[in-house]
């Protein structure tokens, strides 16, 4: 968690000791931390630990606050999954693609060209994105 630092105390009544994690990223959220702490019924301040002693319900409240304030960031792969639909299609009748060209295409290049031609015939959209590894002869 980013908004608090916590450790287990081993106590049955107050199993966790939490304190505000003060840094540049979390400083503006101190009021949110104080608001959650104020709503907790079971809490006590420990001067030796310089932390608030709370129960499991209190820790769950801080976890919910942390998830709301600092949601997990999407990776580029996750963002692209939302934009691109992935379909596996079997490409057939690609052997004669590229005949009459100065340079002959490799089989995998013929399959990609045939896939693009087939996708344009079936869909109203004429945009096709081919994601291929480096060295694939795009």
Image (cartoon, rainbow, N blue to C red):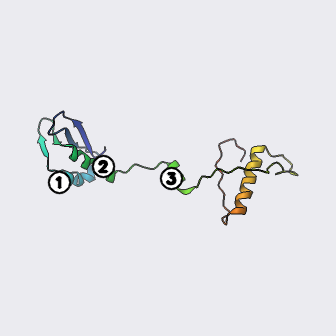
Q: Position of residue 10 (x, y in %)?
A: 18, 33
Q: Is residue 81 above or below residue 21?
A: below
List the residue tagged with mark 2: 66
Give how far apart the Cα atoms at labels 1 and 3 are.
Answer: 37 Å
User: SS for tag 1?
Assistant: helix
User: What percent of the width, then of the height, locates residue 79?
Assistant: 50, 53
Whichever of labels 3 and 2 marks the residue nearer the N terminus, that label is: 2
* Alpha carbons under labels 3 and 2: distance apart: 22 Å
- Kindly identify the residue that appears in the image at 18 percent across and 50 percent down: 37
The one of 29 and 116 positioned closer to us in this rendering: 116
Residue that label 1 marks = 39
Instruction: Name the N-terminal-most of marks 1 and 3.
Output: 1
Q: In the displayed image of the protein, which residue is found farthest to the top?
A: 10
Q: Nearer the viewer, mark 1 or mark 3?
A: 1
Residues marked 1 and 3 touching at CB (< 8 Å): no
Q: Which residue is mark 3?
A: 79
Identify the residue shown where x is 24% and y is 50%. Answer: 61
The reply, left or right, for residue 33 in relation to residue 69 is: left
Element assignment for label 2: helix
Q: Residue at x 52, y 55 (%)?
A: 82
């Amino acid at each position: 968690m980013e908004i608090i630092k916590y450790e287990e105390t081993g106590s049955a009544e107050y199993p966790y000791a939490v304190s505000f994690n003060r840094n540049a990223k979390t400083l503006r959220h101190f009021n949110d931390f104080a608001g959650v702490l104020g709503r907790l019924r079971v809490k006590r301040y420990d001067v030796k630990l310089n932390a608030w002693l709370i129960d499991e319900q209190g820790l769950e409240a801080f976890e919910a606050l942390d998830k709301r304030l600092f949601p997990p960031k999407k990776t580029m792969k996750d963002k692209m999954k939302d934009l691109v639909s992935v379909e596996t299609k079997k490409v057939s009748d690609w052997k004669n693609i590229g005949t009459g060209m100065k340079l002959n295409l490799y089989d995998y290049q013929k399959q990609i060209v045939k896939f693009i031609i087939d996708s344009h015939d079936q869909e109203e959209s004429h945009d096709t994105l081919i994601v291929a590894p480096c060295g694939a002869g795009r």
